[in-house]
Image: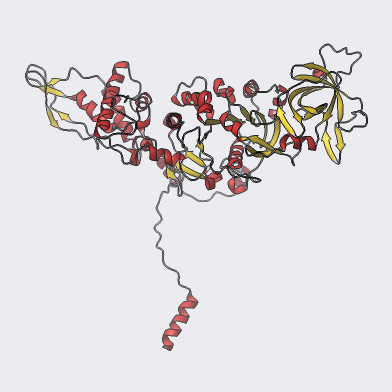
Amino acid sequence: MRDTDPTYLGRVAGVAGASIRVKLAESLSSGLAIIKGHTYRVGQVGSFVRIPQGYQDLYGIVAEVGAAAAPPSADGADIDTGRWMRVELAGEAIGDRFERGLSQHPNIDDSVHIVTESDLKRIYGGKGDDQVPVGCLSSAENITVRLALDALVTRHSAILGSTGSGKSTTVASLLRSIVRPMDGKGADGARVLLLDIHGEYSAALGDIATVFSTTPQPGEKPLVVPYWALEAGELLDFVAGDLNDNHLIAFTDKIQELKEKTLAAGSLAGLDANSITVDSPVPFSLKKLWLDLIDFEIRTLTGTNRDVPAIEKPGDAESLTPPQYTPHAIGSAGPYLNTAAKGIRRPLNLLRSRLLDRRYDFILHPGEWEPDVNGTTAKDLDVLLSGWLGHDKPLTILDLSGVPSAVLVRLIGSILRIIYEALFWSREKTEGGVLRPLLIVMEEAHRYVSPESGNVAADVVKRIAKEGRKYGVGAMLVSQRPAEIDETVLSQCGTLIALRLTNPTDRARVKGALPDNLSGLMDLLPVLRTGEAIIAGEAARLPVRTRVFLPSSEHLPNSLDPAVSEAWATRRKAEGYDRVVASWRAQSTTAVAKKADVKRVAVVDSSSAKSDSKDEKAE
């Protein structure tokens, strides 16, 4: 029977846990097999094999072929060491139902067979409501590969690949497949938040997303992050620099005081005076904070008890104008310096400089969320969160390409903290994370989740990776340098989508994070084609080499390489560099050097005009 069965590969010669060694049949004289009109490659690393076990079949992945796969104790005189395979068992099927894991192991001398198209459909053909089509098998392009959406979101995932391997296209394709798949029902009620560091995805996903940007284009909304929603420590680190303990106390005491005054002026839902802390998301005015502290620092005093301020002109918080005091004098006549001053003039000067720097308006002057000097805002955080997460589109893109690099990581940490804290504490509400889960896609994750990055963003991402599953917050990390991502975070990613990786350090990190024993399959990473990925983990039925679906040309991200030969073959057009400088100064790609003064005049059809004149003459 073995000689006549075209799918027969060989027999099991050794079993060690989930790893088995297969002795290839002598009848396999070539690397090709033709079965029912289809051609199959025999013994390819990464391909599947089937081991019949009565009423059920075991399935495994070829991890190694050749002499290295031979048993260590094999006698080279009696055994051809070049005709061996090492197979890693991965799952089993009973009838048409496939499951990962094993209920039994094969025996010595069990037959091993090629996995044919019908077997592949048995594994990947399921079309449950939680199955999302993401691509096709590299070895059989008519077989669609699907991922389990529940596991993809709740158990976290990572998309890893070198520059030019197709990461951005894979992200765009995967998100579109989740929301609007080509061959089935989509997740129109999905809630996905994408942190777009380079501004690549607005064009690719704009039809299914609401886009927020610090430099909004037509059709986009302005992105603001109220500073008073941040923790006091991270806010002060940005606006006042490094502070010693005494200086930090001076700032935090004043912030606490201003927040308590805001609460006393009007109640805030869920908050009472006894539970307010310096980190509570309560509005307060940074301008008022600056004025009160600088007034105390530069104050001079007169009077017998040296308690009468020698003020000449009061300051103004709105214009950030400091008050003027009579200069202190030497001797007993006064005025005298304020000996209780905290010595914080330098951080106060930095605070004023930050408030005057227009680059940081999106966080320090957040539009309708900016408090007045009394701490009153036109809109509260519920409107902000509703704009980010409560609109009628399944995807939200936060375009951070216009954010200064000095504040980018801190801004990402602030956004993630606001969202996670809101969903964590509202986990029993209908808009909380449990009843309406959220997937956060983090582009360029290595920039803020590296092992030595002790920043707010890294802390929040670690918290999401460890605890997010229980509260309905999933993470998808996207990076070209897996070696620079914190190992704890990467190990929490249950699904890995690995595209081409050429750096050996990066490949080693991916191998160490894999949930399956697939070192042989991971050795294919340097030779993967663009847009081809190895998918393994919780969401994949079996570790698989996949060609990811390519989006249509109008839905590709703005991450394509410039066409150098085409651009250089064209003679340079005479264009002033004033436009270059204008964009640089404005920190906007669409800025113009000269506003075009165009007078628009209504166009009248000459033929209709003549006919009207003839009609008038006839009358």
Q: Position of residue 605 (x, y in %)?
A: 48, 73
Image check: 412 left or right of 157? Answer: left
Task: Pick whichever, 43 or 483, lies toward us.
Answer: 43
Task: Pick whichever, 231 or 619, lies toward us.
Answer: 231
Image check: 107 left or right of 329? Answer: right
Whether residue 449 appears in this view of the structure is: no
Q: Is residue 195 above or below residue 219?
A: above
Task: Pick whichever, 401 or 425, lies toward us.
Answer: 425
Q: Position of residue 352 (x, y in %)?
A: 29, 31
Q: In which quadrant is the C terminus drawn?
A: bottom left
**What residue is rendered at 76% in x and 19% in y?**
19
Q: Quadrant of residue 516?
A: top right
**What residue is rendered at 66% in x and 40% in y?**
133
Residue found at the very far bottom of the displayed protein = 618
Q: Position of residue 542 (x, y in %)?
A: 70, 30
Image check: 586 left or right of 564? Answer: left
Q: Quadrant of residue 530?
A: top right
Task: Pick whichever, 352 or 31, lies toward us.
Answer: 31
Q: Position of residue 487 (x, y in %)?
A: 56, 20
Whether residue 158 appears in this view of the structure is: yes
Q: Is residue 307 above or below residue 312?
A: above
Image check: 154 left or right of 514? Answer: left
Q: How is the image coloured?
A: secondary structure
**What residue is rendered at 79% in x and 37% in y?**
118
In the rendered picture of this protein, how many numbered marks are placed on residues?
0
**What residue is rendered at 15% in x and 20% in y?**
337
